[in-house]
Image (cartoon, rainbow, N blue to C red):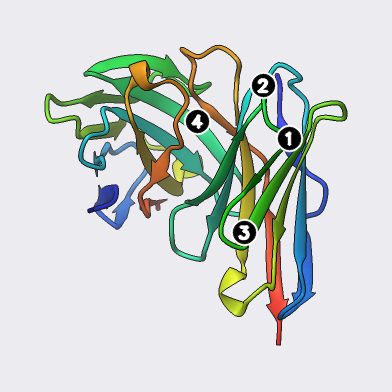
Amino acid sequence: GESVGLHLPTLSVQEGDNSIINCAYSNSASDYFIWYKQESGKGPQFIIDIRSNMDKRQGQRVTVLLNKTVKHLSLQIAATQPGDSAVYFCAEISPSGSARQLTFGSGTQLTVLP
Amino acid sequence: EAGVTQSPTHLIKTRGQQATLRCSPISGHTSVYWYQQALGLGLQFLLWYDEGEERNRGNFPPRFSGRQFPNYSSELNVNALELEDSALYLCASSLGLASGDEPQHFGDGTRLSIL
């Protein structure tokens, strides 16, 4: 079946630097994508979403880029802070609107170094 | 605004027993989703309920079942528990089917341990 995967399982960045977390998806027809942050002992927390009719969307300190040509999604975090340390998941929803199940990647562990 | 709440936080069972997990969605949300997150792994979709009906089901055996109540809260039932059922079970909610694609918001999960 289709899957969503992540390029790197771990990422370490210095506090204050920018972070870039990448995600590859295999279903070229997917049209809705979400980034989640999961801290230890907690459920995934919604960060930002993007629909396939867009290639960029910005939030507070975060930017999501979507490249449909190469089926690639990235999350950029500006001025990374210790509180950003967590596992980050990308997720996609299949183009069949009635399905509405999220397909998650395996996650990237972001560690912010002091 | 209260988020998605799940109970219990932790649940310990033995093989062959049955477990019931509960979820209350965000006020105004009519869709509820259940996911299984095994240790160190990603989230696997289990079930989706909307307006009291099961709308979609993941690739799990029939001993995983659930229901949604008129107040949109939901239960996940797991029968004949097996050791590999040990995982974090996450519930999410979103606006209903008619709203199109909207982000799902998660609770903090129920940690189910099978001894």
State the SS at label 2: loop
Category of crowding for the residue at label 4, using alpha-carbon neighbours closer than 10 angstroms: few (below 14), some (14–19), many (at least 20): many
> Please, which chain is the residue tagged with disc 4 on?
B
Q: Is residue B91 visible?
A: yes
Instruction: Quadrant for the N terminus of chain A, please.
Output: top right
> Please, which chain is the residue tagged with disc 3 on?
A
Counting from the top left corner in percent of width and height, residue B85 is at 45, 41
State the SS at label 3: strand
**Marks 2/4: CA–CA distance:** 16 Å
**Marks 2/3: CA–CA distance:** 23 Å
State the SS at label 4: strand
Amino acid marked by disc 4: Phe
Of circles 1 and 3, the one toward us is 1
* Label disc, if present, on residue A30 of the rendered structure: 2
Badge 2 and badge 4 both on one subunit = no
Amino acid marked by disc 2: Ser
Q: Earlier in the sequence, mark 2 or mark 3?
A: 2
Category of crowding for the residue at label 1, using alpha-carbon neighbours closer than 10 angstroms: few (below 14), some (14–19), many (at least 20): few
Say which residue label 3 marks: A87
Which residue occupies 29% across, 39% down? B17
Taking depth in this image into account, of B70 and B57 the one nearest to the observer is B70
Say which residue label 4 marks: B45
